């Protein structure tokens, strides 16, 4: 037999440790956020900064949102770079220079 049924391991009691407050459902969003460009991210970061100053948002949550916003800005930069490279490649191909040597 693998284990004795007489010895049951006690379940962890999380109610007295304060984890209950940390695991509570988050408050509903005040408004929908659509981040379609860098200007939208700037507005979001401005709102987060204002909420932090007014103590309307938990600093841990604000930090996570700020990290996501920074990552999203990096994605926007990479996307813009890829689009510009594609446009340059198309211009070079249209000029007839693409593939010529010497």
Image (tube, rainbow, N blue to C red):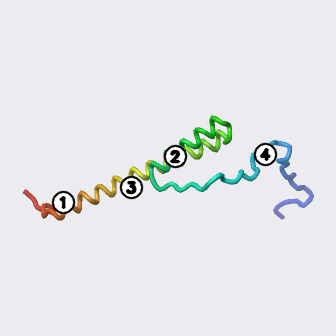
* Residue highlighted by disc 3: 79
Q: Tell me which residue sits at (66%, 36%) in the image.
A: 54
Mark 4 vs mark 2, CA separation in Å: 30 Å
> Mark 3 vs mark 1: which is more N-terminal?
3
Mark 3 vs mark 4, CA separation in Å: 40 Å
* Residue highlighted by disc 4: 21
Which residue occupies the extreme top position in the image? 53
Which residue occupies the extreme left position in the image? 102
> Mark 3 vs mark 2: which is more N-terminal?
2
Above or below — where is 19 with respect to 32?
above
Residue 10 is situated, as x and y percent measured from the top left of the image, at 87, 51
> Mark 4 vs mark 1: which is more N-terminal?
4
Left/right placement of residue 90 relative to residue 52 reads left
Residue 27 is situated, as x and y percent measured from the top left of the image, at 71, 51
Mark 4 vs mark 1, CA separation in Å: 60 Å
Q: Nearer the viewer, residue 36 or 3?
A: 36
Mark 3 vs mark 2, CA separation in Å: 20 Å
Closer to us: mark 4 or mark 2? Answer: 2
* Residue highlighted by disc 2: 43
* Image quarter in which the C terminus is found: bottom left
Closer to us: mark 3 or mark 2? Answer: 2
> Mark 3 vs mark 4: which is more N-terminal?
4
Left/right placement of residue 43 relative to residue 55 reads left
């Amino acid at each position: 037999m693998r284990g004795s049924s007489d010895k049951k391991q006690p379940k962890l009691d999380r109610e007295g440790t304060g984890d209950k407050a940390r695991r509570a459902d988050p408050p509903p969003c005040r408004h929908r956020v659509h981040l379609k460009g860098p200007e939208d991210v700037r507005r979001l970061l401005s709102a987060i900064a204002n909420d932090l100053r007014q103590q309307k948002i938990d600093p841990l949550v604000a930090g996570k949102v700020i990290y996501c916003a920074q990552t999203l800005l990096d994605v926007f930069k990479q996307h813009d770079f890829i689009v510009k490279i594609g446009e340059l490649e198309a211009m070079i191909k249209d000029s007839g220079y693409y593939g010529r040597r010497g």
